Amino acid sequence: DTAVSQTPKYLVTQMGNDKSIKCEQNLGHDTMYWYKQDSKKFLKIMFSYNNKELIINETVPNRFSPKSPDKAHLNLHINSLELGDSAVYFCASSHLYWTTKSQETQYFGPGTRLLVL
Amino acid sequence: AQSVTQLGSHVSVSEGALVLLRCNYSSSVPPYLFWYVQYPNQGLQLLLKYTSAATLVKGINGFEAEFKKSETSFHLTKPSAHMSDAAEYFCAVTSGTYKYIFGTGTRLKVLA
C-alpha cells in the first residue's frame, strides 16, 4: 500500500496554462511538504502544512498556491506556467517534531515530472 | 541558519570497494542529520538518521554513518559497493523544527 502518492506522475503542458498536482498520504502524519527538484537535482522546500495550516512558505512565486483540504492531502496549483517551472515536484509527509518529541523522518512521494513547453 | 555541504557531486567506486560519501553541516543548535537515497525516476528514501542517541548510525542496505561533532561531519560509508548502490545520495539537516535543509546531492557510480 503506497504511503505517499502523487498524481499525475508526468505532466507536459504549454506555457501559460494552469495545472494542479495532488498528493495523499496514508501514514497518519500531521505535516506535509512540497519540494522542487531542479535539473541539477537540487532539492528545495516550497511549502509545508501542519494540520491544514501553512507553516512554511519559502520564496515561491504567487503563481504557486498550495491547498490542504485535510491533513492527509496537500495539493499544489500552479497558474500561468513558465518554462522555469519545469522540474520534479516531490510531496513528503512526517510527524511534526513537537508532536512526537523526536525528529521524524520525512517520507517522500514518487515525484511529478513537470515539463513546460 | 543551518546548511549542508556535500563534497563531490560525483563519486565513482569499483564494485566491492569502500563507499565514502562526505557530508559536512553547519548548525547553531544540536542537529538532526539524515541520509536519503534517490534511485532514477523515484522519490527519496531514508537510508539512516542521527538523532543524538548514538554517534554511529546503521542504516539499510549495509550503509552506516558516523556523527563527528568536532568535525561537523556525517559521512556515509559502506564497506563493499554493489552495483545496485548506484544512485543519488542526499544529506539533510534539521534542528527539531519542520524545516529540512538538503545538500546538493552526490551521484554514486559503481564500476564493474
Image (spheres, helix red, strand yellow):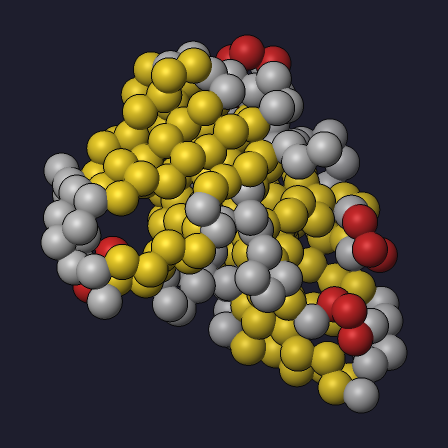
Which part of the image, by quadrant, shows the N terminus of chain B? top left
Instruction: Work out whether residue B66 or residue B88 is closer to the camera in this orientation and state it.
Output: B88
* Residue at 57% in and 71% down: B107
Place of residue B49 in the rendered image (x, y in percent of width and height, measured from the top left)? 67, 40
* Whether residue B62 is visible: yes
Question: Where on the picture, by quarter, is residue A20?
Answer: top left
Place of residue B23 in the rendered image (x, y in percent of width and height, measured from the top left)? 56, 58
* Residue at 61% in and 78% down: B11
Question: Going by the image, does A82 lie left or right of B48?
Answer: left
* Residue at 66% in and 45% down: B46
Instruction: Work out whether residue B22 or residue A98 is closer to the camera in this orientation and state it.
Output: A98
Place of residue B60 in the rendered image (x, y in percent of width and height, measured from the top left)? 80, 49
Place of residue A8 in the rendered image (x, y in percent of width and height, measured from the top left)? 45, 46
Question: Going by the image, does A90 lie left or right of B77?
Answer: left
* Residue at 37% in and 55% down: A11
Question: Going by the image, does A53 lie left or right of B104?
Answer: left
Looking at the image, residue A106 lies above or below residue A40: above
